Amino acid sequence: MSEQRTVTIIGAGIIGLCCARALQRRGRTVTVIDPNEPGRGTSYGNAGILAAGSVLPEGHPGLWKRLPGLLLDRTGPLTIRPGYLPQMLPWLLRFMASTTPGRVEEISKALAAIVMPGVQYYLDLLDDVAADQVPIRRQGCLYLYPKREDVKAAEPANDARRRRGVEIETLGPDEVRQLIPAIGPDMAGGALATQSGHATSPLALSQLLAAQIEAAGGSFIRAKAMGFTIGAEGPSHVRTDQGEIEVEDVVIAAGAFSKPLAAALGNKVPLDTERGYHMMLPQPKIEIRVPMLISSLGFGVTPMNDGLRLAGTVEFGGLKAPPDYNRAQILLDHAKRLFPGLGDEGAVPWMGHRPSMPDSLPVISRSSRFRRVFYAFGHGHLGLSLGAVTGRIIADLVQDRVSDIDPTPYRADRF
């Protein structure tokens, strides 16, 4: 394909921005279409963790035994709104099909290939920016175990991480207290994933990428993509609520809203949305230096420039149901038990839509129907972690280059 073809990216979240900047650095002219300002959608509210240790899928063997209990616990890390269950049943069946031992092993290898280089790929993508202007810190990520049974339950997962090459340091209670002095009495140990990092402001990271794109001649159009006008070689125009926009190469990076756009371009993908919540604490009154994940409670705690962010839980309820901010309050309640001195004055809740595939792998792929259409969505809990990696793979696909990472496991037509 001609190196002079322009590329239109639909979606100005962290994935779309990384794709745009990676393509731009390869010499392509880029246009980004989104109804919101760059980084103001779901990318705004993520946990901010660049999770090099997230090499295991969400589903695992034996999960089906625990699933009913998880779904019935309204304060637990996973819930489904009753009226939404029939609609998402096909997704759930595919999810369970991905929990066999053999399939989990395949998925884990595919996750490791894209998760582990994530921090370095960001630093490469941003190597033309002064280091002190990049809102990324590489201080590791602590898996925190409040109870003794959590320590025992985490051993198989940490063994699996080590097999994938993740550096994990096991910490006893005293070592955790040295790292997190604000921790309360409910703490049995931890494990530090030393290769991980975090964004001190996910919004600032998105805004930095957007500023680079604009400074290098890229453009942003505030519009909602509704569909396409199809010509002899594929889409000739994107139909938006602001009129038609002529296109050449197209990247669909619209997160949880990508499904109908992909279907219009040749691929029906089993994409659904995991509604995630956060509670932002601008005056936490405690110091947390290292981000942490509390898997048994389903949330993370991340120090950011504007306070402390509590983020997590999974709620299946579709794209249209109103937020249930009790889910964010649950995060705060858990955090107060873990950190007795935590302050919540001015706390602000938020909800966003994680674009999730049933096998925990994103779609990073060329369309099955049109050679100049590409997909970059479905990153689930790992959108921020996989932004720069996805951008590089998409740039390779657009330019017909052999990528350092084999894109086969992330094909749109794998189901």
Image: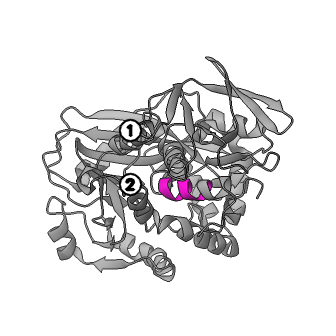
264 on left or right of 106? right
In the rendered structure, which amino acid carries the disc numbered 2?
A: Leu
Mark 2, secondary structure of its residue: loop
Looking at the image, residue 143 lies above or below residue 15? below
Q: Which residue is mark 2?
A: 126
**Is 390 one of the magenta-colored residues?**
yes
Near-viewer residue (217 or 348): 217
Q: Residues within 10 Å of mark 1 (few under 14, many from 20)?
A: few
233 on left or right of 399? right
Label 1 and label 2: CA atoms lie apart by 12 Å
Say the numbered circle drawn on residue 211.
Answer: 1
Near-viewer residue (28 or 61): 28
In the rendered structure, which amino acid carries the disc numbered 1?
A: Ala
The structure residue drawn at horizontal position 43% and vertical position 37%, both measured from the top left corner, is: 39
Near-viewer residue (166 or 180): 166
Q: Position of residue 42 (x, y in %)?
A: 47, 38
Q: Which residues are magenta?
A: 387-394
